């Protein structure tokens, strides 16, 4: 009897194993056996974004006058604005009643009180010395383009040359360096009202240049060692996250002594991330988030003043490719590497498609020189660009991924939408586009950034749960996977940890940890397994 029971149990065990194996072959995986990406971005860590952690900038004197801050100057006497006619190329006047682009200047910060003014057309304000007129003709700044700014508590300013002469708005509407003596803060020709039009750039360049090297090194060393730690990888692993996308800046390849004002130390932090990832069986995507010269003019590209100079400079493009080669050579054989993203969010209005495709093609070849399996990720241009343009570009033949960023934000269209409207867009627009791209020949599809946030505030927890559920349902279908922006953030709903801990984002079970509906045991397979067991039992008697 015991022998028969043993044989019966062996028969049942054999059939159960057969069922598991037959289903295991259908578990959805990427090339090389990796599960689809279920990821989180480590944003604001190795590339600074002040909106993610504003306190990094708290101790900067004149912190509202960083590199790239846009200002307008109005004479308190004439009530006219300082103007660089046609955006530059002429002497500066003080004759405009209403300010626009020609009356707006971008600051280049030399010290907490010394600044250079860049006009709309890219020229710098310049003055040869006391008694001279101010012009907007200089292509690049030096001492004659550098001015002291003195401020009082009411946004009134005096502007003087390094030699000491104060600028004034003359009765003939000119700007000259010949005000006699030292002006007070009353209504006089040397006093201007300064309006800060925008102070939106809070990136690596602004932080390091404003603090100075020693203080910036102290601030960033503390930030890099505490913002992301090994405990975060433990948290991610426990919640089914299998990948981290890690934004880095081009200066990492010159670590530990990158050019001013950038601060070394990101390479050691990236090495740590790879070690932590390996320990928790998490994969890494290295993302070139900040390219030299900036690919989109935003703070996360480390732009100095909002300009986008990367696509017009062969030197900058070559430097970017050198960075890709540095990263590929260093991490190609690391077991935690999943892929390298060649460039984050190039601007559709500033980066021509042919320039981008050529860069992507060269970057692909560089990565392939070091790895035949690492995924090469190419990011869609931000703006009104069709991602299909990259599918049709024939960047490379194997393991190519197109990265799309989906936000129900950053556009007036989303301003007053209800939660139901936002969810409808996810299903109607995003799902339709993903289905078309998944079916297209060529690259895999990656939702490399998305967030559980909408434009309007004061939504309920249920609203966020439903919005997050809709996104997860749709983005889970992306052929490569998705990555949430960001792991940590001062803005709660952008903070992945906060969303998880407070039950605003409900991940459920990872697709890699469960069978999809098509992979569940069908009644036919159950019957087949039962028949198999009976057959074996009969022949073992």
Image: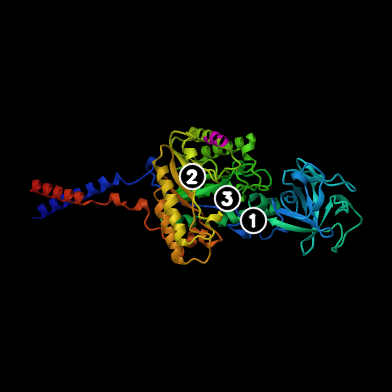
| Label placed on residue 219 | 1
- Residue in the foreground of this view, choosing between 108 and 327: 108
Q: Is residue 526 above or below residue 323?
A: below
Q: Nearer the viewer, mark 2 or mark 3?
A: 2
Graded by Cα atoms within 10 Å as few (under 14), some (14 to 19) or many (20 or more), the crowding at tag 2 reads: many
Q: CA distance from mark 3 to mark 1?
A: 13 Å
Q: Are marks 3 and 1 in contact (CB under 8 Å)?
A: no
Q: Nearer the viewer, mark 3 or mark 1?
A: 3
Q: Residue at x 36, y 52 (%)?
A: 511
- Residue in the foreground of this view, choosing between 347 and 172: 172
Q: Nearer the viewer, mark 2 or mark 1?
A: 2
Estimate the x, y position of residue 176 in percent, counting from the top left.
86, 50
Q: Earlier in the sequence, mark 2 or mark 1?
A: 1
Residues shaded magenta: 354-360
Q: CA distance from mark 2 to mark 1?
A: 32 Å
Residue 241 appears in the figure: no
Judge left or right: residue 67 versus residue 91: left
| Label placed on residue 46 | 3
Residue 385 appears in the figure: yes
Q: Earlier in the sequence, mark 3 or mark 1?
A: 3
Q: Earlier in the sequence, mark 2 or mark 3?
A: 3
Query: Considering the image in quadrants, where does the N terminus appear?
Result: bottom left
Estimate the x, y position of residue 234 in percent, counting from the top left.
45, 56
Q: CA distance from mark 2 to mark 3?
A: 20 Å
Secondary structure beneath label 1: helix
């Amino acid at each position: 009897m015991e022998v028969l029971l043993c044989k019966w149990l062996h028969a049942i065990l054999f059939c159960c194993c057969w069922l598991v194996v037959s289903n295991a072959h259908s578990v959805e995986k990427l090339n090389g056996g990796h599960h689809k990406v279920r990821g989180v971005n480590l944003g604001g860590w190795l590339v600074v974004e002040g909106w993610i952690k504003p306190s990094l900038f708290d101790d900067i004197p004149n912190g509202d006058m960083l590199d790239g801050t846009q200002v307008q100057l109005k004479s308190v006497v004439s009530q006219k604005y300082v103007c660089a006619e046609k955006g530059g190329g002429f002497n500066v006047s003080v004759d405009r009643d209403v300010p626009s682009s020609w009356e707006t200047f971008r600051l280049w910060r030399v010290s907490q009180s010394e600044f250079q003014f860049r006009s709309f057309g890219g020229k710098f304000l310049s003055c040869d010395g006391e008694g001279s007129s101010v012009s907007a003709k200089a292509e690049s700044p030096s001492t004659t383009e550098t001015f002291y700014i003195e401020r009082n508590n009411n946004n009134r300013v005096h502007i003087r040359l390094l030699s000491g002469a104060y600028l004034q708005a003359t009765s003939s509407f000119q700007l000259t360096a010949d005000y006699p003596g030292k002006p007070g803060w009353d209504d006089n020709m040397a006093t201007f009202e300064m309006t800060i039009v925008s102070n939106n750039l809070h990136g690596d360049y602004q932080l390091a240049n404003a603090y100075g090297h020693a203080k910036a090194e102290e601030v960033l060393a503390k930030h890099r060692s505490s913002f992301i730690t090994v405990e975060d990888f433990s948290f991610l692993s426990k919640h089914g996250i299998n990948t981290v996308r890690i934004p880095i800046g081009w200066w990492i390849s010159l670590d530990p002594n990158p050019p001013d004002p950038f601060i070394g130390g990101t390479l050691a932090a990236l090495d740590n991330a790879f070690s932590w990832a390996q320990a928790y069986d998490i994969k890494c995507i290295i993302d070139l988030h900040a390219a030299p010269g900036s690919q989109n003019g935003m703070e996360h590209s480390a732009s100095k003043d909002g300009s986008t100079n990367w696509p017009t400079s062969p030197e900058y493009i070559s430097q970017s490719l050198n960075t890709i080669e540095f990263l590929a050579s260093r991490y190609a054989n690391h077991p935690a590497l999943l892929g390298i993203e060649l460039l984050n969010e190039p601007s559709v209005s500033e980066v021509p498609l042919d320039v981008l495709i050529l860069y992507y093609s060269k970057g692909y070849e560089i990565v392939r020189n070091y790895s035949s399996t690492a995924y090469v990720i190419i990011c869609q241009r931000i703006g009104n660009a069709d991602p299909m343009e990259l599918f049709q570009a024939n960047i490379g033949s194997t393991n190519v991924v197109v990265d799309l960023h989906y936000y129900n934000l950053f556009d007036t269209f989303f301003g007053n939408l209800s939660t139901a409207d936002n969810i409808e867009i996810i299903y109607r627009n995003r799902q339709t586009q993903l289905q078309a791209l998944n079916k297209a020949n060529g690259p895999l599809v990656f939702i490399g950034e998305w967030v559980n946030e909408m434009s309007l505030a004061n939504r309920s927890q249920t609203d966020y749960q439903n919005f997050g559920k809709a996104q997860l349902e749709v983005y889970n279908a992306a052929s490569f996977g998705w990555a949430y922006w960001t792991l940590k953030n001062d803005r709660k709903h952008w903070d992945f940890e906060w969303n998880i801990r407070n039950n605003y984002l409900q991940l459920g079970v990872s697709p890699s940890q469960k069978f999809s509906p098509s992979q569940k045991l069908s009644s036919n397979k159950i019957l087949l397994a039962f028949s198999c067991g009976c057959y074996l039992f009969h022949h073992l008697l």
